[in-house]
Image (cartoon, coloured by chain):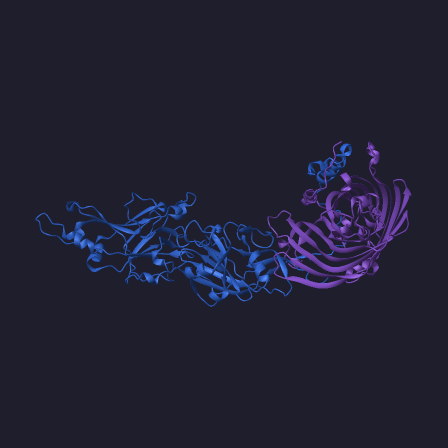
Chain colours: A blue, B purple
């Protein structure tokens, strides 16, 4: 006899569906209230340990690294910096090759048809031009930043680019070649024609452009001959030559268009800007353009007992009076201590190969502490980096064989997700972080954790 | 009259499909919950034979009916004439109250799936799955606290609202493999080897909600898992000294469970694993059934397990002798033509039991009144039974919590001559 199971639900005739309807109503129709305190008074088998917070201030490893780029030398920087302040000083040095002028003059003839040689009389003007980067034209600070007192001198010795940046300025003839107090973004400085003739005939050691007695102490950026980001300056047209150019205008009777010369070498001295501190007690410096990245590790003593890290934050306080640049481009990464320990310099390529980014511009936590503790927060704000994951790895003993240090850097291209808008070698950012010797604002780790209750029945 | 057609070889597999559907309904996700008393110790007793037994209060040790077989006492399966498959389950709607709060929860359990088959006229084999004890409840406590150990500057201490959520869930179950023998016209005996397994998991989670702060703290989560295994044996018998009187008894001697207790913590690459052994006291039970004449009969069971002899873990500190008494009356079904509702079986009963552990240093009692009925399939090829029970667990004054539970039990039994 065939089976018809749909009839199971009808059972025996007239008694059919009632029990099933009732059963399904109870089985399906019931839901539970949301969680509540009922049952919390019972002595359960589990109990969590209290949450504790440790502050770790003792630095174990520290170093201020000069970071170079194997693929892009400092000489190839797109920006030249000028400033004459006590804390931020840099001059621009450049060297030119005017030998083509001799060839040009060889094509000229005087009124009698005789060839002529270069001389002051055939030169109308010699003009040095600087291209101010638009970023330094912020309306709010324009009057402060562009009011520079430019002074141009001739170098005593031939300019060698590989010597820069350096801690002092090169020796130069103290008699200025020219000066200008331009306040516009396009700086035009007239140079002596006689010097041009001399440079053309005898070669040039180079010039130095200094900022002397300026109202502003700030560093200002100008285009170098390598500038590719043309939107950062105001160009007349696509053929405009950039950098600290020298334009030579000829006497009218020669009927020749002016000639513009880019330097064969241009660079910044950066002789008076903060450099890395030798001791973590004095501070930690993070600098871009010519990179200085600090690394450090804390003396964290994790006990044998396991613990869960609820939150771990690296806090550093920034000295806003001497720092400049966007905070959001700071990136925190880990780097093997064995790679950096005892070294003064590192290449970007080594960082790319070894560093692991933890967090950066999208998660920087600006913690403003209780103002009663120290200076007002607007003077010394704290920056916080959430490093929970790496501290948990450390607590788990996973880093015992490969101790890691923290590396404060800028948003390098290879830090996926934290790449800065501009390559760190473009603009200059200086972040002076208070050191371990500061009474109120020393860097520290804040680790909030729960001990694992561990074994036992 | 339309009737159920059930009795071919396809019938048994079809029934399994229906059972699977019911089983699926028995897993309603987050609505699962049980008595909060199951949050502690060895958990709540979730054994259930079938809705027919449940409907009359839980007695059935003296039950032996080849047309209406029960697995309550395996000795009753001796003399079985058909292969029998049983599926039973129940749904609870519980109202748990404390002086400060109350919570309604629902749960569905399918604690019994059994099969038995006759080998000879006097011997049957049985097997299946039976849930023994279970625990399924969540609770949450909320309080305000401050993170930190007091050694740091006050500015770094965060005031946080904390929610502590505890979840305990799991089932201890057994796979009983039994043989039932009809020794004589008045004596049936059975023995089973019960393979016991089970996992009970506890999760304690603490979540932090900082007050007036954007700080985010990872929740603290600890997990505890008891993975248990063991073997027990059960001996049972039914005697019928007089035509209207039958008596039954079962004994499961004391045995051991091996438990591996594992504690883990989220994000922590460490765990603690502690193996230990607990001693489960012997369970013994006796029962009787008396035919009152006509369709009526009365019966009762008594079961005891001296959990004060339990040992192996600190649970023992609060354990006591547990027992259960059940009694009830049954009016069996009738096949009278046009009998209407009067043909239905009718059952009612009462059960009182004591849990094996104390709460607040007070013994914990559970009381049920039950009412049941059922519908036989055509040609005695099985039946479906339902029972409605109302129970009270605990006492507000003594335990601080009291449960009031509505339970709806359903079971289906199919009989099939498969050879």
Measuring from the top left, give residue A308's x and y in whole percent: 63, 58
The residue sitting at the left extreme is: A112
Q: Residue at x 83, y 42 (%)?
A: B370
Q: Nearer the viewer, residue B279 or B411?
A: B411
Measuring from the top left, give residue B383's x and y in whole percent: 77, 41
Q: Is residue B231 visible?
A: yes
- Residue A308 as seen in the image, left or right of residue A126: right
Q: Nearer the viewer, residue B172 or A280?
A: B172
Q: Nearer the viewer, residue A367 or B226?
A: B226
- Residue B272 as seen in the image, left or right of residue A298: right
Looking at the image, how many numbered discs can be counted on the residues? 0
Establish if B68 lies above or below A449. Answer: above
Measuring from the top left, give residue A403's x and y in whole percent: 53, 65
Q: Is residue B321 visible?
A: no
- Residue B307 as seen in the image, left or right of residue A137: right
Q: Nearer the viewer, residue B353 or A7?
A: A7
> Which quarter of the rendered picture does the N terminus of chain B lie within?
top right
Tell me the quarter of the picture where residue B198 sits: bottom right
Establish if A5 lies above or below A431. Answer: above
- Residue A81 as seen in the image, left or right of residue A109: right
Q: Residue at x 20, y 60 (%)?
A: A202
Measuring from the top left, give residue A367's x and y in whole percent: 56, 51
């Amino acid at each position: 006899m065939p089976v018809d199971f749909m009839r199971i639900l009808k059972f025996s005739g007239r008694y059919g569906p009632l029990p099933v309807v009732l059963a399904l109503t109870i089985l399906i129709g019931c839901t539970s209230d949301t969680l509540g305190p009922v049952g919390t008074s019972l002595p359960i088998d589990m109990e969590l340990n209290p949450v504790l917070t440790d502050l770790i201030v003792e630095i174990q490893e520290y170093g201020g690294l000069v970071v170079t780029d194997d693929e892009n030398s400092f000489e190839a920087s797109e920006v030249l910096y000028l400033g004459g302040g006590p804390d931020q000083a840099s001059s621009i040095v450049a060297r030119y090759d005017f030998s083509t002028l001799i060839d040009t003059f060889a094509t000229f003839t005087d009124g009698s048809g005789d060839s002529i040689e270069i001389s002051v009389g055939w030169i109308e003007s010699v003009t040095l031009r600087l291209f101010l980067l638009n970023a330094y034209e912020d309306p709010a600070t324009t009057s402060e930043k562009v009011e520079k007192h430019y002074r141009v001198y001739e170098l005593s010795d031939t300019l060698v680019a590989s010597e820069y940046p350096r801690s002092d300025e090169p020796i130069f003839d103290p008699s200025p070649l020219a000066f200008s107090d331009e306040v516009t973004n396009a700086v035009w400085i007239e140079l002596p024609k006689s010097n041009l003739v001399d440079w053309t005939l005898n070669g040039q050691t180079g010039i130095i452009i200094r900022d002397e007695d300026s109202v502003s102490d700030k560093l200002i950026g100008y285009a170098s001959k390598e500038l590719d980001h043309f939107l950062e300056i105001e160009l007349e047209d696509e053929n405009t030559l950039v950098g600290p150019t020298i334009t030579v205008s000829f006497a009218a009777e020669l009927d020749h268009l002016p000639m513009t010369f880019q330097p064969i070498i241009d660079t910044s001295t950066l002789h008076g800007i903060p450099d890395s501190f030798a001791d973590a007690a004095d501070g930690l410096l993070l600098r871009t353009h010519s990179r200085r990245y600090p690394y450090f590790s804390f003396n964290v003593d994790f006990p044998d007992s396991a613990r869960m890290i609820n939150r771990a934050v690296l806090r550093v306080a920034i000295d806003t009076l001497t720092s400049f640049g966007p905070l959001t481009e700071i990136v925190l990464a880990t780097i093997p201590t064995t790679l950096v320990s005892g070294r003064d310099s590192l290449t970007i390529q080594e960082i790319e190969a070894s560093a692991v980014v933890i967090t950066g511009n999208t998660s920087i936590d600006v913690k403003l502490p209780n103002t009663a503790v120290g200076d007002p927060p607007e003077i010394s704000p704290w920056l916080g980096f959430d490093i929970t994951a790496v501290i948990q790895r450390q607590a788990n003993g996973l880093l015992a064989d490969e101790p890691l240090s923290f590396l404060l850097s800028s948003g390098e291209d290879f830090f996926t997700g934290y790449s800065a808008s501009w390559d760190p070698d473009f603009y200059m950012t200086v972040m002076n972080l208070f050191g371990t010797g500061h009474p109120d604002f020393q860097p520290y780790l804040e680790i909030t954790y729960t001990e694992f209750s561990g074994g036992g029945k | 009259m339309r009737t159920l057609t059930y009795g071919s070889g396809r019938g048994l597999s079809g029934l399994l499909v229906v059972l699977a559907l019911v089983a699926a309904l028995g897993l309603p996700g987050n609505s699962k919950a049980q008595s909060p008393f199951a949050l502690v110790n060895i958990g709540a007793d979730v054994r259930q034979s079938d809705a027919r037994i449940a409907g009359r209060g839980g007695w059935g040790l003296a039950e032996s009916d080849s047309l209406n077989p029960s697995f309550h006492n395996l000795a009753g399966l001796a003399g079985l004439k058909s292969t029998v498959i049983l599926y039973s389950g129940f749904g609870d709607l519980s109202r748990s109250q404390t002086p400060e709060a109350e919570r309604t929860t629902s749960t569905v359990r399918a604690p019994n799936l059994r099969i038995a088959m006759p080998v000879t006229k006097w011997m049957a084999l049985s097997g299946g799955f039976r849930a023994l004890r279970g625990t399924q409840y969540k609770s949450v406590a909320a309080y305000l606290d401050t993170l930190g150990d007091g050694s740091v500057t006050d500015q770094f201490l965060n005031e946080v609202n904390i929610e502590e959520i505890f979840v305990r869930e799991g089932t201890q179950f057994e796979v009983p493999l039994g043989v039932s023998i009809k020794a004589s016209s008045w004596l049936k005996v059975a023995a089973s080897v019960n393979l016991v397994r089970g996992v009970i998991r506890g999760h304690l989670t603490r979540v932090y909600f900082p007050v007036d702060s954007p700080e985010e703290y990872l929740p603290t989560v600890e997990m505890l898992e008891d993975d248990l295994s063991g073997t027990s044996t059960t001996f049972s018998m039914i005697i019928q000294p007089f035509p209207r009187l039958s008596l039954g008894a079962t004994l499961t001697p004391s045995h051991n469970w091996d438990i591996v207790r594992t504690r883990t913590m989220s994000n922590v690459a460490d765990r603690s694993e502690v193996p230990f052994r607990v001693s489960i006291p012997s369970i013994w039970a006796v029962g009787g059934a008396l035919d009152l004449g006509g369709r009526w009969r009365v019966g009762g069971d008594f079961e005891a397990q001296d959990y004060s002899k339990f040992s192996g873990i600190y649970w023992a500190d609060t354990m006591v002798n547990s027992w259960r008494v059940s009694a009830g009356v049954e009016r069996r079904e009738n096949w009278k033509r046009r009998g209407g509702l009067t043909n239905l079986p009718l059952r009612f009963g009462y059960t009182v039991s004591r849990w094996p552990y104390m709460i607040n240093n007070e013994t914990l009692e559970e009381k049920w009144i039950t009412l049941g009925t059922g519908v036989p399939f055509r040609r005695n090829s099985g039946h479906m039974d339902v029972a409605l029970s109302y129970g009270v667990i605990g006492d507000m004054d003594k335990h601080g919590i009291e449960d009031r539970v509505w339970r709806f039990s359903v079971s289906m039994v199919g009989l099939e001559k498969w050879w």
